[in-house]
Amino acid sequence: MKSSDYETLVSEILACEKCPLSRSRTRAVPGEGSLDSIIMFVGEAPGKSEDEQGRPFVGAAGKLLNTLLESIGLERGGVYITNVVKCRPPENREPEEPEVRACNPYLVRQLNIVNPKIVVALGRIAGKTLYEMCGLKWHNMRVARREVVKCRVGEASFKLVATYHPAAALYNPGLREELEEDFRERIAKVASQVGGKTKTLEDFLLRGKKEPTTSQEG
Ligand code: SF4
């Protein structure tokens, strides 16, 4: 049921023409990863490499995300990764409000299919979108980085953590340390607190005990 719902959703996204981004994209990028993951990562929008390959976070920012995941004992294939909008905005501009609104039902369905315990918003656009989906007021990243908020979207109930987009840390090395700290101090801790019974989390906790990890350049 879960996988057939997901296949239907992916087909709809790949054929979607609900906003003008459908005219400039090479291909839509629905998302990828484990549908049983307790953690979902949500970025802003596909970039050039993602648009070419049809996969999320495969460029330089994606390499950094992989490194950050590994730094807390998570494998990329064990989490679910997507973006607020599924098609690349021209010249990598920020997605506009009407585009975010048009694409939002897909994110709602992804949240309800994967049903994660934790959602990590990567960057301001993802943070603002997810806060508002949860009926919360978005102030700024500085405020959001101090909190973990409880959210419900449809049947999905999860803890929401916002941090910088990995691309921001590529352009501003000063943010890299804060991003690594958020993965280590906030995301990993919330993951261990949810204490679910899913295989993914058990694997994560066991690995964390056996293999102390460090962050490193990817
Ligand atoms: S960004 Fe979303 S709403 Fe717009 S065309 Fe792509 S899939 Fe459809």
Image: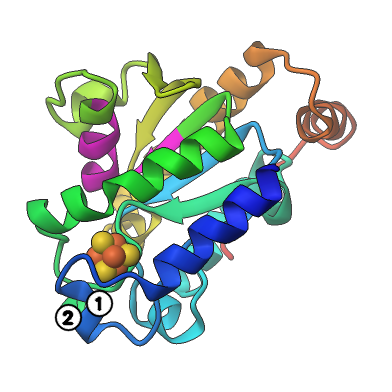
The label number, if any, that marks residue 22 in the structure image:
1
Which residue is at 31% across, 26% downward? 145
**Magenta segment range?**
120-131
Quadrant of the rendered structure where residue 103 is?
bottom left
Answer whether residue 31 is visible to the viewer in this image. no
Above or below, 57 against 124 in this view is below
Ligand 1's quadrant: bottom left
What is the count of numbered marks? 2
Q: Does the residue labelled 1 lie within 8 Å of ligand 1?
A: yes
Task: Point out residue 63 in the picture as x, y percentages from the top left corner.
Answer: 54, 67
Task: Point out residue 198 in the picture as x, y percentages from the top left corner.
Answer: 79, 27
Mark nearest the camera among 1 and 2 is: 1
Report the side of 196 relative to 67 (left or right): right
Above or below, 85 against 193 in this view is below
Q: Does the magenta stretch include residue 147?
A: no
Which residue is at 25% across, 72% downward? 17
Seen from the viewer's position, the closer of residues 102 and 81 is 102
Structural distance between the alpha carbons of marks 1 and 2: 14 Å
Name the residue type under label 2.
Glu
The label number, if any, that marks residue 91 in the structure image:
2
Name the residue type under label 1.
Ser
Seen from the viewer's position, the closer of residues 218 and 128 is 128
State the predominant SS element of the stretch in magenta. helix
Quadrant of the rendered structure where residue 91 is?
bottom left
Answer whether residue 4 is visible to the viewer in this image. yes
